[in-house]
Amino acid sequence: MSRDLVVALSGGIGGAKLALGLSHVLAPENLVIIANTGDDFEHLGLSISPDIDTLTYTLAGLDNTTLGWGRRDETWSFMETLATIGGPTWFRLGDRDLALHVERTRRLRAGETLSAITDDVARHWGIGPRILPMSNDPVRTRVRAETGWLDFQDYFVGQQCRPVIDAIAFHGAEAATPHPDALAALASPRLKAVVICPSNPFISVEPILAVPGMRDAIAHCGVPVIAVSPIIGGKAVKGPTAKMMAELGLEVSAAGVAARYGALLTHYMLDHADAGAVVPQRTSVAQTLMTTLEDKIALAKAVLAVIG
């Protein structure tokens, strides 16, 4: 049996870019994406899964490249009307995006699992690779600021990451069960490599690793485990990664991220701007800033070349 299966761990925007690149160079059956669900929350009575949605929209070619999140060709009548009656508008839900949240909520309340719903949406939109929630059980990321613990979306969207934080927790993780198909993929004789996409290590990747059994499955999978740095030249491409690293007392650099992952990795991919970084893993250098589809495909090919 040939080793042709790649398992990718991904958060939202940055991870979805590399996942899209991988989907262009791997056969659909040879790519499994384990998605972070620590960002999930309920809003306006709806079940929202931001990272799963970003991956789904991106792989379906429906992502909003102007905003960097949500659906393309979006309209905002719902939010505009909500504002006129004094409803909460801090978390924006576009009209097209809203349909997915309504349908997900309906089906969850009817007893379906998040993974079954995600599979069905992917099938309707012609997505080949499998997108797997890290767990069907609820895990919720929270951060601790001077004022106390904050729900992640309140911190990230509501307060625009302004509070200074000193701790992160994944509530519910200790009781969660990893998705069985994720563990099966990591134990498969077809497994060729595990790729940790350039997502925020603290709020996108570590929630996945916090689910009991997931870190061990990766550590003992017996194939290369490669992470792509989300830091370029001491700065995050997007989001609060660098800010969070500084507040947690970590070195804000590509090397700092590599140290955070530690022995879990066998390989680490840096941008050319960080070519001289000293890290404990085997390193490779490529253009890791992805602004075009060609960039995404090129980085995916570079990652696969490293793992042979």
Image (cartoon, rainbow, N blue to C red):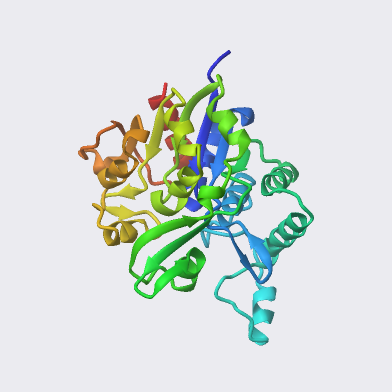
Taking the image as shown, residue 273 lies to the left or right of residue 81, namely left
Q: Where is residue 234 in the image (x, y as percent from the top left)?
A: 26, 52
Taking the image as shown, residue 24 lies to the left or right of residue 47, namely left
Q: Residue at x 59, y 28 (%)?
A: 30
Q: Quadrant of the C terminus?
A: top left
In the image, residue 58 sits, relative to residue 184, either above or below, namely: below
Q: Residue at x 77, y 52 (%)?
A: 111
Taking the image as shown, residue 303 lies to the left or right of residue 262, namely right
Q: Where is residue 149 in the image (x, y as percent from the top left)?
A: 43, 68
Residue lying at the far right in this picture: please name it: 110
Q: Position of residue 127 (x, y in %)?
A: 67, 40
In the image, residue 231 sits, relative to residue 285, either above or below, namely: below
In the image, residue 4 sits, relative to residue 49, either above or below, namely: above
Residue lying at the far bottom in this picture: please name it: 85
Residue lying at the far front in this picture: please name it: 175
Please say whether residue 29 is visible from this viewpoint. Answer: yes
Q: How many labels does the image show?
A: 0
Please say whether residue 293 is visible from this viewpoint. Answer: no
Query: In front: 72, or 304?
Result: 304
Q: Quadrant of the N terminus?
A: top right
Q: Position of residue 265 (x, y in %)?
A: 36, 33
Q: Which residue is drawn at 41% across and 26% down?
A: 224
Taking the image as shown, residue 235 lies to the left or right of residue 1, namely left
Query: In front: 232, or 156?
Result: 156
Q: Which residue is drawn at 46% across and 51% down?
A: 204
